Amino acid sequence: MNDFGKMFKVSLFGESHNICAGIVIDGCPEGIKLNEQLLIPDLSRRKSGIAGTTLRNENDIPEIISGVYNGFTTGAPITLIFRNQNINSADYTQFNYLPRPGHADFVALKK
């Protein structure tokens, strides 16, 4: 898991070749309007087919599974997941020893 921040902490988890990827946002106050539909415009900017994006075709449909009730944040950590449907782990075997461009694979391998 990758963590960023102290008072407002964002943690990323999962892989594109597994069941899902997601995010946990901790430190968000209660009472902020939030639902999946509010996230769609920003998520659409990373859709495949645009220069610099993945060739994989995923729906990128967010599922809020905690921290939101009746469309408003509760003050508890917010967890969103994105289920992967285009999973083919064999597509990644070459990257066991060959770093992917634009990723932190080389650093992770050395670490």
Image (tube, grey):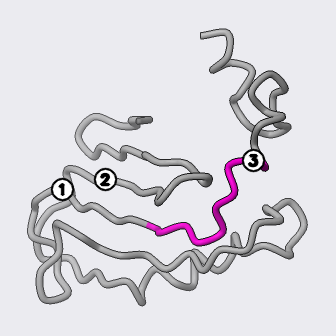
**Which element type, helix, strand or loop, lies under badge 1?**
loop
Residue 98 image-quadrant placement = top right
Residue at 12% from the left image edge and 81% from the top image edge:
69
Kindly state the secondary structure of the residue where label 3 is placed.
Answer: helix
Question: In this figure, which residue is indicated by the disc labeled 3?
Answer: 90
Say which of marks 1 and 3 sits in front. Answer: 3
Query: Which badge, 1 or 3, comes first in the chain's sequence?
Result: 1
Q: What are the residue bounds of the magenta stretch?
A: 82-91
Q: Residue furthest right?
A: 51
The quarter in which the C terminus is drawn is: top right
- What amino acid is found at the position of numbered circle 3 in the picture? Ala
In the figure, residue 80 lies in which quadrant?
A: bottom left
Mark 1–mark 3 distance (CA, rounded to whole Å): 34 Å
Callout 2–callout 3 Cβ contact below 8 Å? no
- Farthest front residue? 90
Does residue 97 appear to the left or right of 62 in the view shown?
right
SS class, disc 2: strand
* Mark 3 nearby-residue class (10 Å; few <14, some 14–19, many ≥20): few
> Could you tell me the amino acid type at mark 1?
Pro
Q: Is residue 11 left or right of residue 14?
A: left
87 in magenta? yes
Q: Residue flagged by tag 2: what amino acid is it?
A: Val
Residue located 79% across and 61% down the image: 54
Q: Name the mark on residue 24.
A: 2
Residue carrying label 1? 77
